[in-house]
Image: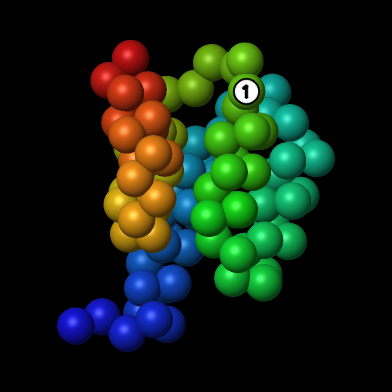
Amino acid sequence: MVDLRQLWTLIKADLHRALKLLPDSADQQSVRRYYEFVEHNELELACDALEESVKDRPVTGEFWLALLDAARKMEPAENATRYEMRAKG
């Protein structure tokens, strides 16, 4: 069984992977909010901020897969479903 701190570490790794895949055109205000949310372990909000940072911008399927991995660990089912659909194109 994974304890809460280990789970947070795994989720943060997924989010960081998504962060590294952001396009240069990503909304920087959303990226700043991402960092604030991660700092306070508000990981679902951090995930949302990354999603918002690429709104109406092209992004790779790998980005969505990283968010999907994070979402599955956090269990917000609607986010996981949305990211899975976007990852498939």
In the figure, 72 relative to 85: above or below?
Answer: below
Q: For label 1, count other residues whose C-alpha is less than 10 Å away and answer few (under 14), some (14-19) or many (20+).
A: few
In the rendered view, does 34 fall on the left or right side of 43?
right
- Residue drawn where x is 53% and y is 55% of the image: 44
- Identify which residue, 77 or 54, lies in the foreground: 77
- Give the position of the C terminus as an image quadrant: top left
- Residue drawn where x is 42% and y is 72% of the image: 9
- Residue drawn where x is 76% and y is 49% of the image: 32
- Identify which residue, 82 or 24, lies in the foreground: 82
- Give the position of the N terminus as an image quadrant: bottom left
Residue 64 visible, this orientation: yes
Amino acid type, label 1: Lys
In the rendered view, does 20 fall on the left or right side of 27?
left
- Identify which residue, 29 or 22, lies in the foreground: 29
Residue annotated with mark 1: 55
Q: Which of the 4 image quarters holds residue 85?
A: top left
Q: How is the image coloured?
A: rainbow
- The image position of residue 60, as x and y in percent, is 42, 24
Give the total of numbered labels: 1
Residue 62 visible, this orientation: no
- The image position of residue 59, as x and y in percent, is 49, 22
In the rendered view, does 25 fall on the left or right side of 74?
right
Farthest residue toward the left?
Answer: 1
- The image position of residue 88, as x and y in percent, is 27, 20
Q: Secondary structure at mark 1?
A: loop
In the figure, 42 relative to 32: above or below?
Answer: below
